[in-house]
Amino acid sequence: MNLVEKTEKIFALTTPLYYVNGLPHIGSAYTTMAADAIARFQRLLGNQVLLVTGTDEHGQKIQRTAQTKNLEPQIFCDRVSAEFSSLWELLNIQYDRFIRTTDSRHEVIVKDFFKRVWDNGDIYLGEQKGWYCVSCEEFKEERDLLEEKRCPIHTNKEVEWRDEQNYFFKLSKYQEKLEHLYQHHPDFIQPESRRNEVISFVKQGLQDFSISRVNMDWGFGVPVDPKHTLYVWFDALLGYATALLDAKEEAGLEKALQKWWPISLHLIGKDILRFHAVYWPAMLMSAGLTLPQKVFAHGYLTKDGQKMGKSLGNTVDPIALVERYGSDAIRYYFLKEIEFGKDGDFNEVRFINVLNADLANDLGNLLNRTSNMVKKYCGGNLPAVTAEDIPVENLLKAIGLDLGSQVKVAYQDLAFDRGCEAVLALVRACNKFIDEQAPWSLYKQGQQDAVEKILYAVLESVRLSAYLLSPIIPDTSNKIYQQLGFEVNFNDQTQTAIAAPFAVHAQWGVLSSEQKLDKPQPVFKRIELPKND
Ligand code: MSP
C-alpha cells in the first residue's frame, strides 16, 4: 500500500482551495482558522510545518459568475482571490503557501499528472448523461434530488441535464484498493462517522467519473484532446501538489513532491469528502504517488439551521466580525464552541456571552486581580517561589502537571473544544482557589509565605493556560506572556518554537522570580451586548 508512516518532523497540511464565485464568508474562514491553529500547535512541538491554502478558480460556476459581472474570468478571479488572502491576514492566519489554480505553474503539474494516469490506461472517452449541479460542480444521482430537481446542498438551485462525450477516469478499477486502504488505515478518514459514510458509499460500487467538459473553456485543455476542458475538480485537487513548489521554482510534478509530500492532513468540510477520500486517493494510486495520511472532514456552520454558503446567500460577513470583535474572539468562538467534526450554529448573542465568560471574566480578570495582588502584597515583584515549593496536593499544581499532555492529545485529535475546555477548567479552578484561600485575609494575618505561594500558583497557571491557548488566541496569549515578563511573541512562530518550546512551556512551573511583571491591564475587553432598538 502506497501509504507511508512519516516521522513527526515534517507536517504539511491543507485547507480546501476555495471557489472564488463569491467573497469569503465565515464558513470558508472556519477551516482556515482551524488549519492555522493546528499549524501553530505543530510548530510549538518543534515540527517543520507547511500550511497550504488557496483558491480554486476554474470551472463553469466561476465562468458564469464572472459573466454576470461582465468581467473577464481572470480579472474576476484576481479580485476575489485577493479578498481571501486579505481575510486570512485579518484573522491572523499565517499560511505558508497560497496557491491559485490559474497559476501557470499549475498547468505543468496537471499535465504531468494527467500523463501518468493516461499512461496507466485509466482515462477513456465515454458518454456522460446525468444531472449536474453547477454550484457543487458535481453530477448528482436522481434519487438524491429534492423536488423540482433541486440540489440537496444548494437547495435553491436546480440541477442541469447533461448529455455529452467526456473523458472518464476509471475509478471503478480502484474499488478494492480503496476498501483495503480504509480497512488498514482506520485513521485515514476522520471522524469515525465520516469514515463509515465513505465506506458505505464505496461498498455500493464505484462508478467511473468524467474528468472533462465540453462547451466550457474556463480551465486547462485536456492534454490529449484540447477540444475538452479538464473538469475543475481534477485540476483543483492537484493544486495541493503545485502549492508545494518553492517560490520561483521551476514547475514539475516530481520536483513539487520532493520535500513536503505526502500531505499529513487534508482539512475539509463534509460536503467535499468524496472528492478527497475516494476520488483523490484513487487518482494518486493511478499516478503511482503516495497517499495523504489523513483527511478530516468538519461539519457545517449553519445560520438558522441552514448551511451558510455563497450559493444560498445566507452568510455571516467575517470582515465585519473581525472589525467588531478582533481575530482572537472569532477564532476562539468557532474552535472552542463547536465540536470539530459536528455542525455548529452561529448566534451573535451566544458569541458575546461565551467570550465575556471565558476570556474577559474567567481568564482576563483572573490575571488582572492576581497581578494587582502581587502589586499590593509583594511590591509588584513575582514572589521568590518555585514550583518545588508548592506541594503536589495543591489543586492547581495537580491539574497543571497533567494539563500539557492532556491538551496535546486533544489538539492532536483536532478536538479544539476539548483542549480549550481542559484549559478553562484550570482557569476556573484558579478563580475558586483564590476565593477560598482569600490571600487578602492571609496577608492581614501576616502569612506572607502562604500569600506568595498562592499568587505564584495562580500566575503560573495563567501562564500555562495562555501558552496552551496560544494556537487559538495568539494575540491574547501574547498580552498575558508580556504582562508576565516574557519576551515571547506567539505570532513569530520560529522565535516561539525556540524561546518557548512545548516540551518546556507546556509544563507547570516555568514562571520564576526573575520575571519582571508588566503593569496590570485587561488582556481581553468585555464586549457589550448590542442594544435592541
Ligand atoms: N473548490 C472546492 C474545494 C476544492 S479543494 C481542492 C470547494 N470550494 S468551496 O469554496 O465551495 O468550499 C470550500 C470549503 O469551505 C469546503 O470545505 C466547505 O465545506 C467549506 N464551507 C463552505 N461553507 C461552509 C459552511 N457553511 N460551514 C463550514 N464550512 C463551509 O468546495
Image (spheres, rainbow, N blue to C red):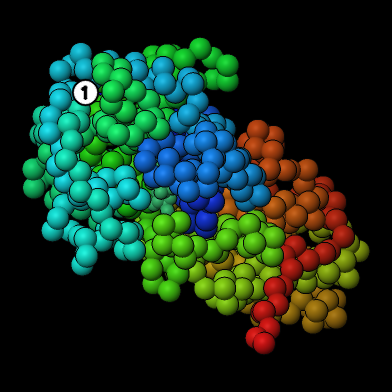
The quadrant of the picture occupied by the C terminus is bottom right
The quadrant of the picture occupied by the N terminus is top left
**Residue 91 appears in view:** yes
Mark 1: amino acid? Ser
Left or right of 505, for residue 512:
right
Total of numbered circles in the picture?
A: 1
- The residue at the far right in this view is 379
Point out residue 212 in the picture as x, y percentages from the top left corner: 26, 30
Taking the spot 76% from the left edge, 76% from the top edge, the residue there is 439
Q: Which one is in front, 59 or 144?
A: 59
Q: Is residue 67 above or below residue 397?
A: above
**Residue 261 appears in view:** no
Q: Is residue 45 above or below residue 419?
A: above
Point out residue 319 in the picture as x, y percentages from the top left corner: 63, 57
| Quadrant in which residue 183 is drawn | top left
Taking the spot 54% from the left edge, 20% from the top edge, the residue there is 246
> SS at mark 1?
helix
Taking the spot 25% from the left edge, 54% from the top edge, the residue there is 159
Q: Which residue is mark 1?
A: 286
- The residue at the far front in this view is 70
Q: Is residue 497 above or below residue 369?
A: above
Taking the spot 14% from the left edge, 55% from the top edge, the residue there is 142
Q: Is residue 78 above or below residue 376?
A: above
Q: Which one is in front, 126 or 518?
A: 126
